[in-house]
Image (cartoon, rainbow, N blue to C red):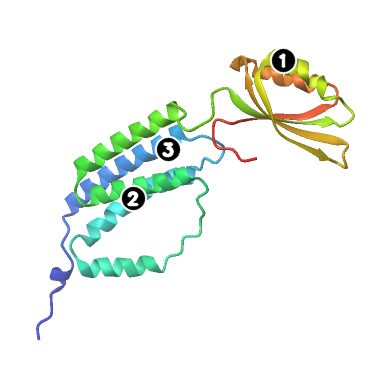
Amino acid sequence: MDFLKAKDLVPILDPLQVGILLIFAIALGLAIAWTYRKTHRGFSYSQSFSITLVVVTVVSAFIILLIEDSIARAIGLFGAFSIVRFRTAIKDTRDIAFVFFALATGLAVGTGSIAIGITGVLIICTLIFLLHLSNFGGLRKLEYVLNFVMDAKQSQDVFQDVFNEYLKTRNLLHVEAKDKGKVLFFSFNISLKYEDKMKEFLGDLNKVPGIEDVNVISSKNDLEY
């Protein structure tokens, strides 16, 4: 009984073609990682994640090149990846979108659809930059969260003069008694009259008797209280 030959099960890949496609995948992966770095906000930026985006793009393209039209290879790769456990948690939902972006780009390159891959990267990266520059979905500009601790014996009027001088709006978000009621922790949502006056505002607030541990967090991104 004749069995299928190996060449019938495993397509023969042209090394030059594979190399060209993987170079395209690297270039597009770098474009995705660069977009991620330039549009990232907050304190959770990870260099390793940027590298991962490039690698995911190339690896996904390589997997498609390996599979091609071979059902045997597809089943084998599926079985191999089914035993892998990914334990790294992705905190930002935006990072998940970038992972899918890299995967989709790699799939496009792996199937030889270079034009589709390049067009998709250009359009999606442009969209990401436009959303980033417009602060889409974020809070209004010049808005911050102000936190400070005040001696409970002090009247709340002690900081009102500083607020009136520098702030355009202020909303009390949270107040909490600490150290058995000896100090009060305040949290305000604020917007400044002038963005360049932040340093002066913090300096004058720190000079108010009974106030310490003054800090400001930008609220242009998502915040939970």
Q: Residues within 10 Å of mark 1 (few under 14, many from 20)?
A: few
Tag 3: residue type? Tyr
Badge 1 is on which residue?
164
Circles 1 and 2: CB distance less than 8 Å? no
Residue drawn where x is 46% and y is 60% of the image: 86
On the picture, is 10 further left or further right than 127? left
Q: Quadrant of residue 14?
A: bottom left
**Does residue 209 lie above or below 63 as drawn?**
above
Q: Count the numbered circles shown.
A: 3
Under circle 1, the secondary element is helix
* Coordinates of residue 132 in the picture (x, y in percent): 44, 30
Badge 2 is on which residue?
103
Marks 1 and 2, Cα distance to the nearest angstrom?
51 Å
Where, quadrant-wise, is the C terminus in this rendering?
top right
Q: Please name whichever residue, 32 or 98, is drawn nearer the observer in this view of the structure.
A: 98
Q: Please name whichever residue, 163 or 212, is drawn nearer the observer in this view of the structure.
A: 163
* Coordinates of residue 87 in the picture (x, y in percent): 50, 59
Q: Quadrant of residue 131?
A: top left
What's the mark number on residue 36? 3
Marks 1 and 3, Cα distance to the nearest angstrom?
39 Å
Under circle 2, the secondary element is helix
Tag 2: residue type? Leu
